[in-house]
Amino acid sequence: MAALTPDTNSPTTVGDAAAGSSRYFGTAVASGRLGDSAYSTILDREFKMITPENEMKWDTIEPSRGSFNFAPADSIVNHASAHGQRMRGHTL
């Protein structure tokens, strides 16, 4: 039986494989998990696009009438920017 050897030109991550066909591979991100090194390592290695889970939804941005909190959304935007990831601001 012949041994299989990986192609040296093949993508090493799912995100790279998707990019090779002009697509992106993304995931939903919870701002509270960004401090978890295992979570962030996988996030930054595998995904080229991120979407906040709830951080850009109305009830998170304006928890009470006239009181705004952009910090959770900002933390995801800042993370994406620092790691060369695209952002999808759904429900914003």
Image (cartoon, rainbow, N blue to C red):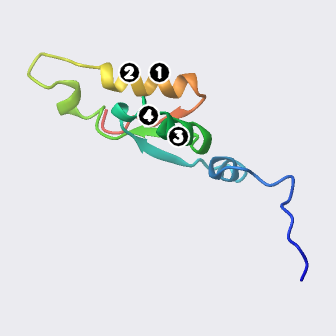
Q: Which residue is mark 2?
A: 74
Taking the image as shown, residue 7 lies to the left or right of residue 54, namely right
Determine crowd level at label 1: few under 14, some 14-19, many 20+ residues with C-alpha closer than 10 A: few
Residue 5, percent from left and from top: 87, 65
Residue 92, percent from left and from top: 31, 32
Are the residues tagged 2 and 1 within 8 Å (C-beta)? Answer: yes
- What kind of residue is marked 4? Asp
Q: Who's the residue at 51% across and 46% down the image? A: 26
Residue 89, percent from left and from top: 39, 34
Determine crowd level at label 2: few under 14, some 14-19, many 20+ residues with C-alpha closer than 10 A: some
Taking the image as shown, residue 60 lies to the left or right of residue 73, namely left
- Rounded to the nearest angstrom, the CA distance separating label 3 from label 2 is 17 Å
Location of residue 55 (image quadrant):
top left
Are the residues tagged 2 and 4 within 8 Å (C-beta)? Answer: no
Q: Which residue is mark 1?
A: 78
- Rounded to the nearest angstrom, the CA distance separating label 2 from label 1 is 6 Å
- Rounded to the nearest angstrom, the CA distance separating label 1 from label 4 is 16 Å
